[in-house]
Amino acid sequence: MFESFTIENLSFQYSDGSQILQNIFLKAREGEIIGFLGRNGAGKSTFFKSLTVYNEGLGSTFINDVYVSKNKLIKNIAYLPQYTFLPKEKSVKYIINMFPISKDKKQEILSEERIHPLLKQKFAYLSGGEKRYLEFLLINSLQKNIRILDEPFSEIEPIYEHKICEHIRNNQKGNVYIITDHKLPVIKELCTRVVMLINGALIEVSDISELAKYGYAFN
């Protein structure tokens, strides 16, 4: 049974020696939806990639307080990157059917009201919001306990922002979500707690209104 995911002393520097992450500590418990914020260039995507695609970097990771190697950790992470990653010249139907998710999940996505009319179209011809929504549905359907989402609401219309939030809440039990996005009102409404990356260090934000001190503003 999944209970927690812990990151200790995670550090990362670029080849020129500049330090972007410094001794990051984060413990995420089952059921939490954590908003992971920071200004552009603060290192949010680097943090996510250091857990998934980068081999460089220092630090230790634990599942249920038991150390896990990076190879094992990756098998427990569903990662939605900031960039588009699905094959552009394949049809939406082909992409859904080839994705490594259960038949039931495939059928749910194939019949989803926004996706079903697009099944014959090539992925390249979808709008930015349609692409992002499909990518989210696929990644969120993976049987992984740790779900890392890098800007899942990018180009998403308000009605589908709400649907994405519903999907996340419906899968909240038994999993951990770590989400970064620039749509702060959505983060405020969705997340159970918020952390912020500043000068390579991670701080806990006890009240989201505190973000104004760091130059964030929203209605």
Image (cartoon, helix red, strand yellow):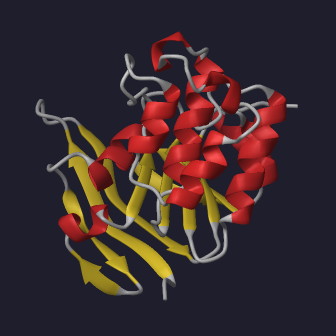
Quadrant of the image containing the C terminus: top right
- Can residue 187 be seen from the camera position used here? no
Looking at the image, is 134 positioned above or below residue 28? above
Which residue is at the front of the view, 72 or 51?
72
Looking at the image, is 29 positioned above or below residue 79? below
- Can residue 162 be seen from the camera position used here? yes
- Image position of 165 (left or right of 123): right
- Image position of 31 (left or right of 212): left
Residue plotted at (18% across, 36% down): 14
Residue plotted at (37% across, 48% down): 47
- Image position of 135 (left or right of 50): right
Query: Splitting the image into 4 quarters, where does residue 94 fall?
Result: top left
Q: Residue furthest right?
A: 219
Which residue is at the front of the view, 32 or 216?
32
x, y percent for residue 92: 51, 28
x, y percent for residue 191: 71, 57
